[in-house]
Amino acid sequence: MQRFLLLVAVLFAGSAFAQQVDVSGKDFLSGAGDAKLAAIAQQAETAGKALQVTAPDYWQAKVAAKLHAGAAGVVIKANNGFFENVLVKLVDVEPAKAAAPSADEQAAKLAAERAAAQKAAEEKATQEKMAAEQAAAARAAAQAAAAKAAAEKAAAEKAAAEKAAADKLAAEKAAAAKAAADKAAAEKAAADKRAAMRDGMLKNLNGGRPAEGDLQVGQLLAGDVVYVNGDLRGVVRRGSSRLQFYWLQGELNLDRIELAPNGEGRYKVVRPIDAGAAPVLRTRSGGTLAAAIPAAGSAARTSLQDQYAEGRDVTDSLKPVELRQGDVIYSGEGAALVVRRAGGQFTRYWLVGTLDLGQIGLQKQGGNAYKVLSDTIK
């Protein structure tokens, strides 16, 4: 016991002038620093000083208890530290301040502060959770609004597309109805026009009487006259007692050599037509005529002689430079027959050579007829 008191006295004497003590965490926890703490507490009480304790908050109550064990009335100022050691300093007592709280009060205060901090943390966590939930709700609402807007837009576009399609269909139906009506009107007008043309041909060519019937192309006879008005073709045939009128049916190429143009829309049949044979056509060139004497017995020779030489054989010929004013040239397939009037007589010649049908000295008379207007033909 005496040895312990002597040790305390020595420590007290050595620290009489010490202003602070530093106790490591190891000495504090093991109790090796209790004597230092008790000594500085007694020194503070004797000097009328207070103690400022810097230590972790979870050691503050224990430090205070050790200091009060050395001097029960000493004033302690707690200062939280970050390191696990204890630093105790002598400081002046603030006269205006109340007495330092007891260790229990400090522990209660620390517990209250920790509870408040925990509550604040919980409240903050609650607020953050509520904020996150509100943000999530806002995002969900925005997404729902966007989805609704997209659905409304899609519905509007679909409705617009359906309306456009319906309008287009209605327009197409209206156009089709109009086209059908126009076509019907045109067909009726054409039918009325054709009926009027038909009645006009009957009136002009048959005294208004109905036709005797229909004729096919192969039934045409030499001497028949074919009248053409649009797609209507009538045939006037001299009968035993009067003229007879027929409607001509079937396809007929009006350029065939069996037909001789005899005025506008009028053709005289010079010989029967073999409908099954390939047609031989009159020359219709508007540029150059290359003519030669057709072979004896050829279709071109026979046709031209039948039409323009009363069926007699033509043996004479002449060149284009020998043509004279008043001559009439009738062209055929690669051949041309020239009819010349001399007084009251007609002479016929085969044209031999190339003739420019566009020169000034020639005048076209019909489908294949050209009249010579001067003696300077080349």
Image: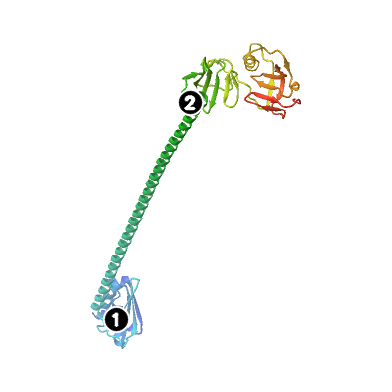
Give how far across and how far down residue 315 sits, in percent.
Answer: 70, 12
Residue type at the position of mark 2: Gly
State the residue position of label 2: 208
Q: Check if mark 2's residue and mark 1's residue have beta carbons within 8 Å.
A: no
293 lies above or below 159: above
- Along the line of sight, which residue is nearer the eye, 230 or 204? 204
Badge 1: residue crowd in 10 Å (few <14, some 14–19, many ≥20) = many
Residue at 51% of width from left, 16% of height from top? 241
Q: Tell me, what colour scheme is on the image? A: rainbow
Residue 249 visible, this angle: no
* Residue 224 horizontal side relative to residue 2, left or right: right
The image's mark for residue 76 is 1
Q: Secondary structure at mark 2?
A: loop
The image's mark for residue 94 is none
* Between discs 2 and 1, the one toward the N terminus: 1
The C terminus appears in which quarter of the rendering?
top right
Give how far across and how far down residue 348 sits, in percent.
Answer: 70, 16
Badge 2: residue crowd in 10 Å (few <14, some 14–19, many ≥20) = few
Residue type at the position of mark 1: Ile
Q: Secondary structure at mark 1?
A: strand
* Residue 349 horizontal side relative to residue 263, left or right: right
- Along the line of sight, which residue is nearer the eye, 9 or 276? 276
* Residue 101 horizontal side relative to residue 303, left or right: left
225 lies above or below 138: above
- Along the line of sight, which residue is nearer the eye, 266 or 273? 266
Give how far across and how far down residue 257 sits, in percent.
Answer: 60, 19
The N terminus appears in which quarter of the rendering?
bottom left
Residue 165 visible, this angle: yes
Give how far across and how far down residue 141 sits, in percent.
Answer: 32, 58
Looking at the rendered image, the disc whose residue lies closer to the viewer, 2 or 1, is 2
Q: Quadrant of residue 375?
A: top right
